[in-house]
Image (cartoon, helix red, strand yellow):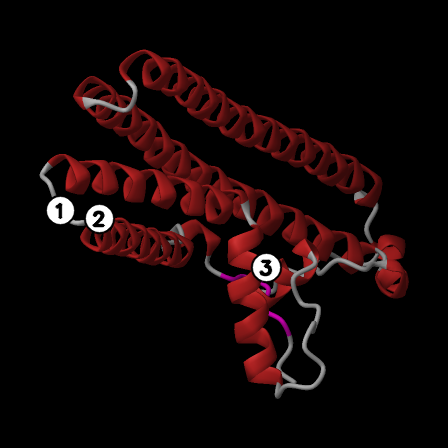
Amino acid sequence: MSTEIPPLGRDPAAGAKLQILATEHWSLLATRSLTYTESLGRVNMFLAILSGAVIALALVAQADHFGPTFITVAIFMLAVVLFVGVATISRLMALNQDDFRWVVGMNRLRKAYLELHPELEPHFVTSPYDDLPGVLQSLGLDIEIFPDKPLRRRQQLGSAFHGLQTLPGMLSVIVAAVAGAIVTLLAFAIGLPLYGVLIAGGAAFVVAEVLMGIWGSRSVRRLSPSLAARFPSPKT
């Protein structure tokens, strides 16, 4: 059974359909705006906690001169910051999945618009297709930023750099640094030599960053069955 909407001239209910589609479109836009607002609020909360912890540790360091009390307090406070950071990244990943859902919904509505008025297609810069290439086009992530590389290589490099530029990607670097600082303090507390302390802290940073990168990659691949493509992009 065909799901295409009859052209405007042959569909007496086209005006009502346009009104319903536009209402849903504005609803998705408003919901997407709320998603961005919560994302920024979560990031600001984490940065405020991190800044407060650093200021508190500076005061403790002045009083204890980086002694055992400072190390104990620092490990505890940084552990709290680490927990808040991981929880923040988890929530940001969930919000990114929600944002993906809203873009899929708007692409489907755009497909309905073009079925009613196909002559408007040249005026759209976003996609009417709800598969991954269509969503990436609507998000503006189909830009080839490495013209001297093969197409597949350009897409891989662009994806990696984009991942580090997102809110979860940037926060993962900060959270990994916090994890490295905790391990560094623990290594110093048990009496490791300086090079051992540096190696332990660096290794903890790398391991934490890699684990969060894998976590983020898997979260991107977990899509709801309701987001299965109904209007895939044409094969080229």
- Name the one closer to the observer, 157 or 102: 157
Kind of residue sitting beneath label 3: Asp
In the image, residue 153 sits, relative to residue 225, either above or below, namely below
- Name the one closer to the observer, 47 or 98: 47
The CA distance from mark 3 to mark 2 is 50 Å
Question: Which residue does the numbered mark 2 point to in the structure image?
Answer: 197
- Name the one closer to the observer, 194 or 231: 194
Disc number at residue 236? none
Does the rendering let one see residue 104? yes
Q: Do the numbered discs 3 and 2 sit on residues whose CB atoms are within 8 Å? A: no
For the N terminus, the quadrant is: bottom right
Determine the residue positioned at 75% across, 41% down. 17
- Name the one closer to the observer, 47 or 188: 188
Does the rendering let one see residue 131? no
Residue 74 in which image quadrant? top left
Determine the residue positioned at 59% across, 68% down. 158
Kind of residue sitting beneath label 1: Leu
Question: At which x and y percent is residue 223?
Answer: 40, 53
Q: Earlier in the sequence, mark 3 or mark 2?
A: 3
Depth-wise, is mark 1 or mark 3 nearer the camera?
Answer: 1
The CA distance from mark 1 to mark 3 is 55 Å
Question: At which x and y percent is residue 140?
Answer: 70, 58
Question: At which x and y percent is residue 20?
Answer: 72, 35
Q: Residue furthest front?
A: 65
Question: Which residue does the numbered mark 3 point to in the structure image?
Answer: 130
Question: Which residue does the numbered mark 1 point to in the structure image?
Answer: 192
Helix, strand or loop at mark 2: helix
Depth-wise, is mark 3 or mark 2 nearer the camera?
Answer: 2
The CA distance from mark 1 to mark 2 is 6 Å
Task: Give the magenta part as a residue range.
Answer: 229-233
Residue 143 in which image quadrant? bottom right
